[in-house]
Amino acid sequence: MSIKVMLADDHVLMREGIKHLLEFDGSIEVIAEASDGVECLEKLKNINPDILLLDINMPNKNGIEVLEELKKNKNSVKVLILTVHSEVEYLVKAIDIGANGYILKDSGSIELKNAINAIISDDSYIQPSLLPALNSRLINRDMDKEKLDSLTKRELEILKQVAEGMFNKEIANNLSISERTVKNHISNIFKKIDVSDRTQAAVFAIKNNIVKLY
């Protein structure tokens, strides 16, 4: 029985090329295609492919948004991200949401089929060239989690306000404590998260979702 695949990519030539490669030996069948995220989600309401090959850069809804929607709706289709984005941020985001695999569009047909076969066998597949960056990021994230866990509730409150650009006097007024107490807290925060100034502390807070940029 052939593996049933859906392709979601906004470039017609890319879809045609991938379809030709996948169907060449008869082990894989492309049963549907979509040119944007909304079309992809609509078609998945009526079909059940084994694997969705999902591009990140698509109009209307991008691949990350499609993946989030699928997981929110508990759709069981396995998702292989096929993208030009080699930046580790995209990879980490996709894996966190629940992608089963992630490879780049400059991969060869053999690697693409290996990824599909691995995912069908309930394994995950990350392009090997991306693994060092992924492992480094995950290690750093674990280290950040340890640093966050070391902060008290009061220190987290103060770090958030530092990241929002508040001065010690403003923070003291907001929390009804003295400026000296704020200064001592900030000194302890800097030591715990291993930064040397307010800018670095703000970057740490944004990176770890203590505050968000709008």
Image (spheres, rainbow, N blue to C red):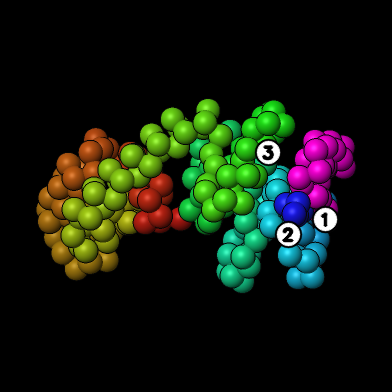
Please state which of residues 164 and 110 is positioned toward the viewer in this rendering.
110
Amino acid identity at mark 2: Pro
Q: CA distance from mark 3 to mark 2?
A: 16 Å
Residue 90 visible: no
Count neighbours of disc 1 (C-alpha within 10 A) and say few if under 14, some if 14 to 19, many if 20 or more: some
Amino acid identity at mark 1: Ile
Say which residue appears at 68% left-offset and 38% top-offset: 113
List x then y, in percent, for residue 154.
20, 62
List x then y, in percent, for residue 66.
67, 58
Task: Please give the residue where the numbered disc 2 appears in the rendered image.
Answer: 49
Say which residue appears at 41% left-offset and 49% top-offset: 206
Image side of residue 152 versus residue 67, left or right: left
Amino acid identity at mark 3: Lys
| On-image quarter of the N terminus | bottom right
Say which residue appears at 18% left-offset and 45% top-offset: 192
Image side of residue 199 versus residue 116, left or right: left
Q: Residue furthest front?
A: 1
List x then y, in percent, for residue 76.
61, 65
Mark toward the start of the polypeptide (3 vs 2): 2
Q: Are marks 1 and 2 in contact (CB under 8 Å)?
A: yes
Image side of residue 204 versus residue 148, left or right: right
Please state which of residues 196 and 166 is positioned toward the viewer in this rendering.
196
- Is residue 18 located in the magenta-colored stretch of the structure? yes
Magenta region: which residues? Answer: 9-34
- Is residue 30 located in the magenta-colored stretch of the structure? yes
Mark toward the start of the polypeptide (1 vs 2): 1
Task: Please give the residue where the numbered disc 3 appears in the rendered image.
Answer: 113
Task: Please give the residue where the numbered disc 1 appears in the rendered image.
Answer: 31
Q: Secondary structure at mark 1?
A: strand
Up/down of 109 relative to 203, above or below: above
Count neighbours of disc 3 (C-alpha within 10 A) and say few if under 14, some if 14 to 19, many if 20 or more: some
Count neighbours of disc 2 (C-alpha within 10 A) and say few if under 14, some if 14 to 19, many if 20 or more: some
